[in-house]
Image: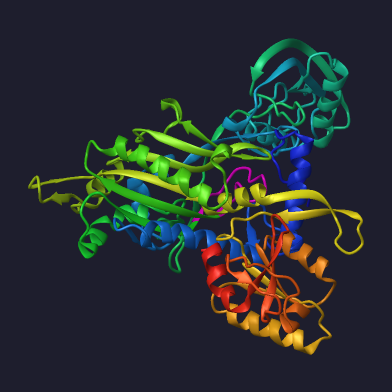
């Protein structure tokens, strides 16, 4: 499936669609990301990470974990279970309020989030389809369908067909852009009635109006949308052999609640003082109305979340600190500060408990979208769980000699969204001359930050039919293998091997050539800055992915040099 088949219908930029098509194709071709259950037609909103994708994802998570729990003294790690007692979700408010408004296109039955419908202006044509009454025993089906999508059928209402039954009057409205005319609307309206099995109908146009910034019509086709209805996003399941209300729980929609529920246990065993944090990376599940934009909005995804507990009144200060910390971190993984927009979420759009929220948004090809939310949650979560469980969750402040519920600042990042942002940022095409043929060709390269790259270095013997070159290449490969992810390749011309590794984002290529055996012919400076003298043996060619610059380096210096460049 091309990207155009999985994006929001609101995305219409052809250049963005073309770029994303290329990225999606590369992800499958090179083993980054596959459609889940692909041989069975796939599963919307679910994705599998292939050999290179899982390395990229793992590197990203490992670096986040290192920055949070290893390089700081005030954060500890945690791994909570996906399944929790249903009471957790009642206390947190998720069971009652974790929902989105759903609307349905009355033409195609596709479903969308009502709050993500792009406002449109134009001319609305209101029709009544005059339809002969259905046969006896069938008419209730049409009324049930009409009720399910929120429209009113006027006319025939009885459960059996009397002789004097009147025709059905089935209303339907269409919005078209200004200047298009009524014919375009009539075409859509006719499709509406035909798709419902009505062949014998007459379109009756009973009203025309101009509208501005309306969200009542599908931007894809102009068809009327059903009234919004609330749709709970949590995925329900049952624990144990009996499926009744006492066995209900949910696949967690966020990782945060386990950290709040276990706050006291973690505090007691870690012996931390405020401010301190609990960090977790884990799966979450949301029954999204309309998964779209490749892996950006999925039903199964991973989060990197930190709950940072602070003294009451200091939350706003820590919110600002964490905003700057997180912006700097994204630069370290290859997403430049200039591509990240900081949105101060307005009061009307914040969660009711939030005392301040920033969204860090990235310039994806399909628009500026959220990467991470940084929220000052107050003490809402600890307070709710303390009240509902009856267990004390207060912190005892030894300096003040008093107990209180800490406030919480939560930086919450999406692993899959960040991987997608890194792929979009890294992808580049450039025209270069082939080193062997001299012809111009397009080089596709993923310019990953070296610390995130799935493969750190590739090792090549210049010729695979020269045993002495192959033997040294394999020794170099075996030396580096325990230290980092490396790749060995000896087939195809060396230029082609370079191109393949460029396309998967490998920062360094190491070629064992005849100067490795016979000694270098010209003096130079090593990649480490050390001198390379004429006749010096056991050096290799080191090629840099981004600049394609080649320089020599002693084999003995490779491990330390590459570790310094990729960590």
Answer yes or no: is residue 97 visible.
yes
The image quarter in which residue 162 lies: top right
Image coordinates for residue 145, horizontal then vertical, percent: 68, 36
Residue 287 located within the stretch drawn in magenta: yes
Task: Judge from the rendering whether residue 265 lies leftward or rightward of residue 201; answer left or right.
Answer: left
Answer yes or no: is residue 351 visible.
no
Task: Judge from the rendering whether residue 425 lies leftward or rightward of residue 491; answer left or right.
Answer: left
Image coordinates for residue 387, horizontal then vertical, percent: 23, 46
Front-most of residues 103 and 425: 425
Residue 383 located within the stretch drawn in magenta: no
Start-end of magenta stretch? 284-300
Q: Is residue 359 above or below residue 225?
A: below
Front-most of residues 192 and 8: 8
Residue at the (53%, 72%) spot, across then down: 560
Q: Please identify the residue farthest to the left as the structure is shown.
A: 401
Front-most of residues 70 and 462: 462
Image coordinates for residue 420, horizontal then vertical, percent: 62, 51
Q: Is residue 316 above or below residue 72?
A: above
Front-most of residues 413 and 97: 413
Report the coloring of the rendering: rainbow
Q: Main secondary structure of the magenta part?
A: loop
Residue at the (18%, 52%) spot, across then down: 392
Q: Is residue 21 above or below residue 184?
A: below
């Amino acid at each position: 499936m091309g990207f155009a088949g999985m994006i929001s219908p609101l995305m219409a930029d052809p250049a963005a669609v073309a770029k994303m098509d290329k990225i999606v194709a590369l992800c499958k071709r090179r083993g980054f990301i596959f459609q889940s259950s692909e041989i069975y037609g796939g599963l919307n909103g679910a994705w599998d990470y292939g050999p290179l994708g899982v390395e990229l994802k793992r590197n990203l998570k490992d670096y986040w974990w290192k920055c949070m729990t290893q390089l700081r003294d005030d954060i500890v790690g945690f791994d909570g279970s996906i399944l929790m007692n249903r009471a957790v979700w009642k206390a947190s408010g998720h069971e009652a309020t974790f929902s989105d408004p759903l609307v349905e296109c009355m033409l195609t039955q596709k479903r969308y989030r009502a709050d993500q419908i792009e406002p449109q202006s134009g001319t609305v044509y209101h029709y009544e389809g005059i339809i002969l009454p259905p046969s006896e025993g069938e008419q209730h089906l049409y009324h049930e369908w009409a009720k399910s999508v929120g429209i009113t059928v006027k006319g025939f209402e009885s459960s059996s067909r009397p002789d004097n039954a009147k025709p059905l009057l089935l209303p339907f409205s269409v919005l078209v852009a200004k200047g298009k005319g009524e014919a375009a609307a009539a075409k859509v309206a006719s499709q509406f009635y035909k798709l419902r099995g009505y062949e014998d109908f007459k379109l009756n146009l009973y009203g025309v109006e101009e509208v501005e910034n309306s969200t009542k019509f599908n931007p894809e086709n102009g068809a009327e949308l059903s009234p919004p209805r609330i749709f709970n996003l949590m995925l329900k399941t049952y624990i144990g052999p009996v499926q009744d209300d006492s066995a209900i729980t949910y696949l967690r929609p966020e990782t945060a609640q386990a950290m709040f529920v276990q706050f006291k246990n973690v505090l007691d065993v870690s012996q931390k003082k405020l401010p301190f944090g609990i960090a977790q990376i884990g799966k979450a599940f949301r029954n999204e109305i309309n998964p779209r934009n490749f892996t950006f909005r999925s039903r199964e995804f991973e989060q990197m979340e930190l709950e940072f507990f602070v003294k009451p009144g200091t939350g706003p200060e820590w919110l600002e600190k964490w905003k700057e910390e997180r912006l700097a971190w994204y630069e370290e993984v290859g997403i430049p500060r200039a591509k990240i927009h900081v949105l101060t979420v307005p009061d009307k759009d914040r969660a009711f408990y939030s005392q301040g929220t920033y969204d860090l948004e990235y310039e994806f090809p399909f628009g500026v979208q959220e990467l991470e939310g940084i929220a000052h949650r107050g003490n809402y979560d600890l307070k709710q769980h303390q009240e509902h469980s009856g267990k004390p969750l207060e912190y005892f402040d030894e300096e003040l000699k008093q107990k209180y519920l800490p406030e919480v600042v939560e930086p919450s990042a999406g692993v899959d969204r960040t991987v997608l942002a890194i792929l979009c940022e890294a992808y580049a095409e450039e025209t270069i001359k082939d080193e062997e043929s001299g012809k111009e060709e397009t080089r596709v390269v993923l310019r990953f930050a070296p610390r995130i790259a799935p493969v750190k270095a590739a090792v090549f013997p210049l010729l695979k039919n020269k045993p002495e070159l192959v033997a040294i290449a394999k020794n170099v490969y075996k030396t580096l293998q325990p230290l980092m992810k490396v790749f060995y390749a000896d087939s195809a011309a060396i230029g082609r091997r370079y191109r393949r590794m460029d396309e998967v984002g490998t920062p360094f290529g190491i070629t064992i050539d005849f100067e490795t055996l016979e000694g270098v012919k010209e003096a130079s400076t090593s990649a480490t800055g050390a001198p390379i003298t004429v006749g010096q043996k056991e050096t290799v060619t080191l090629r840099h992915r981004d600049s394609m610059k080649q320089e020599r380096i002693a084999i003995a210096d490779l491990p330390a040099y590459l570790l310094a460049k990729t960590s």
